[in-house]
Image (spheres, grey):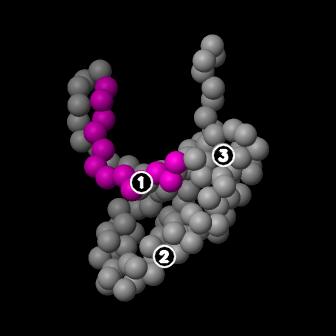
């Protein structure tokens, strides 16, 4: 099995809308994510976490920056296509502009 990182992506406005949902709607949305996790438990290596503020570090130093990455998960699958197909019905796709990018880990030579 190969490892893959799934990055949950959504525009800031969609995240803000999600975070301002009434408690009963938030509970229902969270239940959908939990059900998806339960259904795909055999493929999940690390269930990940929501992500927040970002700092960029480059030759010029450290600065605040923004991107649309809202969370991550690490899964295992036979192929990159198989890993991507796991997320076709993921509730993260319900965010307006929501998408999931699936990135294959490349083993380091000699490790």
85 displayed left or right of 47: right
Residue linked to disc 1? 49
Element at badge 1? strand
Tell me the quarter of the picture where residue 30 sits: bottom left
Question: Which is nearer the N-term, disc 1 or disc 2?
Answer: 2
Where is 35 relative to 105, above or below?
A: below
Q: Is residue 7 visible?
A: no
Could you say where residue 58 lies in the image, as x and y percent from the top left?
31, 26
Tell me the quarter of the picture where residue 27 sits: bottom left
Which range is magenta? 46-58
- Residue at 28% x, 49% y is 53
- Residue at 60% x, 52% y is 44
Residue linked to disc 3? 76
Question: Which is nearer the N-term, disc 2 or disc 3?
Answer: 2
Question: How would you rate the neighbour count of disc 3 (Cα within 10 Å): few for under 14, some for 14-19, many for 20 or more?
Answer: many
Element at badge 2? helix
Question: How would you rate the neighbour count of disc 1 (Cα within 10 Å): few for under 14, some for 14-19, many for 20 or more?
Answer: few
Q: Are marks 1 and 2 in contact (CB under 8 Å)?
A: no
Mark 2 and mark 3: span between their CA atoms?
23 Å
Could you say where residue 26 lies in the image, as x and y percent from the top left?
38, 78
- Residue at 47% x, 56% y is 9
9 displayed left or right of 83: left
User: Which label belongs to residue 31?
Assistant: 2
Main structural element of the magenta stretch: helix, strand or loop?
strand
Element at badge 3? strand
Residue placed most toward the observer, 75 or 91? 75
Residue 35 in magenta stretch: no
- Residue at 39% x, 84% y is 25
Where is 42 relative to 90, above or below?
A: above
Could you say where residue 68 lies in the image, as x and y percent from the top left?
41, 54
């Amino acid at each position: 099995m190969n490892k893959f990182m799934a990055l949950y992506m959504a525009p800031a406005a969609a995240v803000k809308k999600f975070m301002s949902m009434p408690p009963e709607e938030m509970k229902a949305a969270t239940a959908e994510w939990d059900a998806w996790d339960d259904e795909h438990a055999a493929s999940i290596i690390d269930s990940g976490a929501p992500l927040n503020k970002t700092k960029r570090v480059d030759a010029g130093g450290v600065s605040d920056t923004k991107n649309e990455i809202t969370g991550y998960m690490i899964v295992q699958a036979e192929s990159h296509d198989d890993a991507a197909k796991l997320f076709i019905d993921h509730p993260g796709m319900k965010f307006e502009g929501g998408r999931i990018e699936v990135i294959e880990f490349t083993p380091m030579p000699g490790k």
